[in-house]
Image (spheres, rainbow, N blue to C red):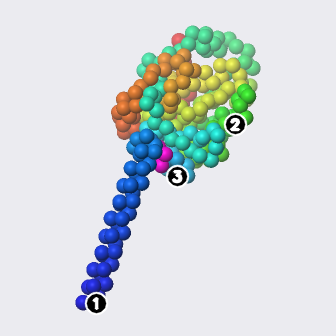
């Protein structure tokens, strides 16, 4: 009887603790939801309280959210799920006339001015170049924590770089993450005019050739309108994301040949 009583008492204490914990969780969720402005924003806030890692990075992108370090406090990672997502349709993206003329003239350029495009040959150098402050800015959103996570994801085969060179010197490039049929461009840089534009155009041609279904650039940005940027509502983006991430597509290291 004593043994039964001890087990019975232990079960009661366990059930009380479980109910109490759930009640506290519900109250905390209600308070967090109200403070954040909604359950979706509460979820984004909760992600920001966890240390950034390759697992968390992938988990977030699978849900259609992405991280950006806070510019005023680089130690804080904030997650975003914008109401409007910037999408560049891979079947009918655009090539600006000025860039088209530049690409057509490539074979006539002097050797020291010609651009060479490579893929995944200098990922670390490319992301470090993207992390350099630009203009009058003294800070960059690409923090050491973010870069460390990106390098690990590159080694795992998820993060990729498309790079442009002149005279074998890295002068531009774009970084992004591929999860099956979804590719998200994250950042780019250039030290020579047109270097990042050309890298990005090659990326678009490559994504289409590889069979990718969805390509986004996060929040819509004016710079990408030259490639046919469209604004996609959040729910529509999430629906297309589900289809893309269950499609078995592989990001290859093949550099596409442009045809005009």
Label 1, label 3: how far apart the Cα atoms are:
45 Å
Q: Quadrant of residue 110?
A: top right
Give the distance between the C-alpha atoms of the residues marked 2 and 1, in whole angstroms.
67 Å
* Residue farthest left in this picture: 1
Give the percent coordinates (x, y) of residue 153: 55, 45
Horizontal side of 80 relative to 242 (left or right) equals right
Label 3 residue SS: loop
Position above or below: 149 against 193: below
Q: Is residue 43 magenta?
A: yes
Write the start and end of the magenta stretch as one range: 42-46
Residue designated by label 2: 139
Which is nearer the N-term, disc 2 or disc 1?
A: 1
**Magenta region, mostly helix, strand or loop?**
helix
Q: Residue sitting at 44 percent across and 23 percent down?
A: 231
Give neighbour class at mark 1: few <14, some 14-19, many 20+ (Cα, 10 Å).
few
Image x and y of residue 92, in percent:
44, 17
Residue pointed to by mark 1:
2
Residue 206 shows in this picture: no
Residue at the location (67% across, 36% down)?
A: 140
Q: Are marks 1 and 3 in contact (CB under 8 Å)?
A: no
**Residue position marked by numbered label 3 in the rendering:** 50
| Quarter assignment of residue 12 | bottom left
Seen from the viewer's position, the closer of residues 93 and 14 is: 14
Q: Is residue 134 visible?
A: yes
Q: Residue at x 63, y 24 (%)?
A: 196
């Amino acid at each position: 009887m004593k043994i039964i009583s001890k087990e019975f008492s232990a079960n009661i204490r366990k059930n009380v603790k479980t109910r109490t914990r759930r009640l506290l969780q519900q109250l905390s969720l209600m308070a967090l939801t109200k403070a954040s402005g909604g359950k979706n924003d509460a979820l984004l806030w909760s992600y920001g309280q966890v240390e950034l890692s390759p697992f968390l990075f992938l988990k977030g992108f699978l849900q259609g959210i992405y991280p950006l370090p806070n510019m005023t406090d680089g130690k804080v990672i904030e997650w975003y799920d914008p109401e409007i997502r910037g999408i560049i349709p891979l079947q009918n993206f655009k090539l600006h006339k000025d860039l088209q003329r530049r690409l057509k003239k490539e074979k006539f350029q002097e050797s020291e001015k010609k651009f060479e495009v490579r893929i995944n040959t200098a990922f670390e150098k490319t992301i470090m170049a993207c992390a350099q402050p630009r203009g009058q800015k003294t800070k960059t959103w690409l923090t050491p924590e973010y870069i460390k996570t990106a390098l690990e994801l590159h080694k795992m085969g998820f993060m990729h770089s498309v790079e442009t060179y002149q005279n074998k010197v890295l002068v531009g490039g774009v970084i992004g993450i591929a999860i099956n049929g979804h590719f998200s461009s994250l950042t780019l840089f250039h030290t020579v005019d047109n270097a990042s534009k050309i890298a990005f155009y090659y990326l678009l041609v490559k994504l289409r050739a590889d069979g990718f279904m969805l390509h986004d650039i996060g929040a819509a940005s004016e710079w990408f309108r030259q490639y046919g940027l469209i604004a996609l509502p959040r729910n529509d983006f999430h629906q297309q994301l589900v289809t893309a991430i269950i499609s078995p597509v592989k990001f290859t290291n093949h550099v596409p040949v442009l045809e005009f």
